[in-house]
Each structure stands twice: as structure tokens, then as C-alpha cells.
């Protein structure tokens, strides 16, 4: 089949959406299909731009291109899932979060409110036209049901370079790789380190808009000897940091999916997350594969110290995580089989 993956592109920002799109394309090609990814640049402001982009995607007909019949479109995210096609499958990465779970009525302008109503109405109209609706995790399916009263089926997919993650004997550090952004909440971990009583150290990898704020926070708390911001690292370096860590901290606010949880499990490392962290809660089992805590630095500090003081038990938590990952049948083959149903052509 000729298949188009409809997505968006945010210039100069690479993240989970890019990896997911590339992984899906590669998997579909493995099954013998011709695949193209069609993207349109996206920016979060101004409101007028987003409003125009909605109308643009709604008016795109992907049934035929230059004499080529397109057999299927797989739509991933807002507003690309508005594209028109007779055989459109939704594998929802995320909606426009700013008008759903991140919407703040107290600071919203009239334009924001109008955009919210338009997006919610259009989402419902377009999703109801799609017979096969999937999401990339249960958390996203829950949101779709909560805000739009529309059902979908979660399909988990593996992180990039799934087979490259490994485990070594642990060093006395907690690893925290992610973009340095407010929603990722690395500040919880930084603040927790002022309360730890052991010699545990934190290594935070990544770059982003909160870098300066985090550097200032570390300095103000006088914990530069306990928290290291190491900036951008390569994929190979990241895999090594995982392998040698005592555990992984990943506690964003209401995350969509979260590759970091899966990468930690593949590295046989326990995960500390929070009760409001979203996607990570679908994998972390409290006291079995890690810890689920309140987003409270003092409580997080207690869990950090526990990992340091109970290394044998911490290792067992990590091993449990790898076992549970394997039990969930997280694979690209499974993704393709569910998205395409009986239209497979495996090579």
C-alpha cells in the first residue's frame, strides 16, 4: 500500500514526536509498504496562526497525489489529524494540550477562549469520522474520553534504539535525562537534593528554556557538589548513563507517554515518578519497579536516600521493570499489525 503519515514539524526541536514518526515509517516499510511522511511547520503562537492552520489541514485532500492513489493516511497529532482521506487511521500522539488539560481559565484571553471552542468542536467532528481510533498510551485515551467523549485504543511503541539499552553495576547517582522545561519539573529533583542525607548525586542531562533557572536554583541551594547539569549528550552517552545509574528520576506534569520511563526499564533501573506525572504511571508500579510519590521534594529525597542505602533491593526493582516491559509486548510489529489490521504485507 501507499501510506502517508500526516504529522507536524516544530523547527529546531527534536523530541519524542520525531522519533515516533520515524519509527512508524521504518516499521511500515519493513512490512512492505511505500511510505511518505508529510509535515507542515508548526508554532504555538499567535492564535491567528493556529486558527489558520486548522482550516488549512481541514482543506487538505490526501486521497490522490499527482496521479498516485493513496491507500491510507495515518494521522498522529494536532492539527494534522484534520486531513481528509477515505481511509484515515488515527494514532493519537496528542491534541492541542493548551486548550485541554493545560488550559488556564484565569489567564485566557477572549481569543484563547474562542480558539478552545473551535478546536474542541473540530476535534469531535473530525474524530467521529474516523472508524479506527488509536492512541499511543492510556493517558491520551483517557484525555480524549474526558474532554471529547470519544473512545480510542492505546498502542504502546518502543523507544528509539530499544535494543541498545543495557545494565551495568550502579554508581551512586540518579540519572534524569529530558528537555529542561517547566513541565518536565527537574526543579523537584533539584530541590529534593537539599534534603538528602546520603552521598547520592544527581546527573541531569539535556538543554532547554529552564537551564538558567536551574543553574541559579542549584547555586542558591548550595548543592553544586550534589547536582550536575551536563547539557546535551549523545544517544550512546545517554545509554551509558542509564546503564550505570542507581535509578532514574522522571516526574513531569501529566506526560503524554514518556520514553524515559521505558528507557529506564530497558536498562533495568528503578524509576521515581509522581502521582500526577501521567504516562509514566502506566508502567511504574509503586514499590515494585520504582516509586510513585507526591510531587514533594522532601518525600522525593527520602526515596533517593532509600535507593542509595538499599542497593540490592534497588537492583531488584530495576529487574522487575525490565520483566514488566517485556510482558507488555511493546514492539513496532505490534503497532503496525494493530494499525493496519488485515492489510499486512510482511517482507
Image (spheres, rainbow, N blue to C red):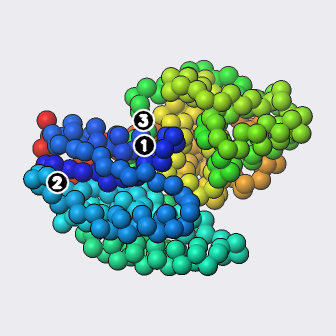
- At x 61% / y 41%, what residue is drawn? 179
Task: Classify residue 172 as left or right of residue 45.
Answer: right
- The percent position of residue 125, horizontal first and vertical second, equals 35, 77
Task: Give the residue number, with chain letter if any, for mark 2.
Answer: 65
- Nearer to us of marks 3 and 2 is 2
Q: Earlier in the sequence, mark 3 or mark 1?
A: 1
- The percent position of residue 165, horizontal first and vertical second, equals 47, 28
> Picture quarter containing residue 198?
top right
On residue 160, which mark appears?
3
On residue 256, which mark appears?
none
Q: What element carries label 2?
A: strand
Say if residue 334 shows up in the picture: no
> Picture quarter containing residue 232?
top right
Say if residue 23 shows up in the picture: yes
Q: What element carries label 3?
A: loop
- Nearer to us of marks 3 and 1 is 1
> Picture quarter containing residue 331?
top left
Task: Classify residue 36 as left or right of residue 167.
Answer: left
Q: Distance between the residues labelled 2 and 1?
A: 24 Å
- The percent position of residue 226, horizontal first and vertical second, equals 81, 30
Task: Classify residue 53 as left or right of residue 108.
Answer: left
- At x 28% / y 55%, what residue is drawn? 74
Q: Distance between the residues labelled 3 and 2?
A: 31 Å
Crowding at mark 2 (Cα within 10 Å: few <14, some 14-19, many 20+): few
Q: Distance between the residues labelled 3 and 1?
A: 10 Å
- At x 52% / y 47%, what residue is drawn? 258
| 114 or 89: nearer the viewer | 114
Task: Give the residue number, with chain letter if any, for mark 1.
Answer: 18
- Image quadrant where one finds the C terminus: top left
- At x 42% / y 43%, what residue is drawn? 18
Amino acid at each position: 500500500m501507499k501510506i502517508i503519515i500526516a504529522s507536524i514539524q516544530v523547527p529546531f526541536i527534536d523530541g519524542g514526536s520525531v522519533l515516533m514518526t520515524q519509527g512508524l515509517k521504518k516499521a511500515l516499510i519493513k512490512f512492505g509498504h511505500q511510505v511518505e511522511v508529510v509535515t507542515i511547520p508548526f508554532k504555538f503562537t499567535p492564535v491567528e496562526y493556529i486558527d489558520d492552520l486548522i482550516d488549512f489541514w481541514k482543506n487538505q485532500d490526501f486521497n490522490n497525489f499527482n496521479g498516485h492513489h493513496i491507500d491510507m493516511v495515518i494521522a498522529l497529532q494536532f492539527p494534522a489529524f484534520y486531513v481528509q482521506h477515505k481511509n484515515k487511521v488515527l494514532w493519537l500522539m496528542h491534541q492541542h494540550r493548551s486548550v485541554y488539560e493545560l488550559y488556564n481559565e484565569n489567564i485566557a484571553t477572549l481569543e484563547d477562549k474562542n480558539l478552545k471552542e473551535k478546536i474542541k468542536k473540530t476535534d469531535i467532528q473530525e474524530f467521529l469520522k474516523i472508524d479506527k481510533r488509536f492512541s499511543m498510551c492510556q493517558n491520551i485515551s483517557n484525555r480524549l474520553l474526558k474532554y471529547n467523549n470519544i473512545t480510542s485504543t492505546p498502542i504502546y511503541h518502543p523507544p528509539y534504539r530499544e535494543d541498545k539499552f543495557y545494565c551495568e553495576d550502579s554508581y551512586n547517582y540518579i540519572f534524569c535525562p529530558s528537555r529542561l522545561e517547566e513541565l518536565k519539573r527537574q526543579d523537584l529533583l533539584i530541590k529534593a537534593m537539599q534534603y538528602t542525607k546520603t552521598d547520592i548525586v544527581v546527573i541531569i542531562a539535556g538543554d532547554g528554556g529552564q537551564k538558567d533557572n536551574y543553574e541559579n536554583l542549584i547555586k542558591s541551594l548550595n548543592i553544586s557538589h550534589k547536582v550536575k547539569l551536563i547539557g546535551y549528550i549523545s544517544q550512546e552517552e545517554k545509554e551509558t548513563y542509564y546503564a550505570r545509574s542507581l535509578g532514574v528520576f522522571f516526574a513531569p506534569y501529566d506526560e503524554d507517554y514518556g520514553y524515559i520511563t521505558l528507557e529506564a526499564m530497558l536498562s533495568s533501573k528503578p524509576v521515581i515518578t509522581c502521582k500526577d506525572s501521567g504516562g509514566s504511571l502506566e508502567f511504574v508500579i509503586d514499590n515494585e519497579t520504582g516509586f510513585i510519590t507526591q510531587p514533594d521534594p522532601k518525600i522525593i529525597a527520602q526515596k533517593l536516600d532509600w535507593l542509595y542505602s538499599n542497593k540490592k533491593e534497588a537492583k531488584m526493582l530495576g529487574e522487575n521493570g525490565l520483566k514488566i516491559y517485556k510482558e507488555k509486548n511493546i514492539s513496532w510489529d505490534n503497532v503496525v499489525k494493530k494499525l493496519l489490521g488485515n492489510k499486512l504485507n510482511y517482507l
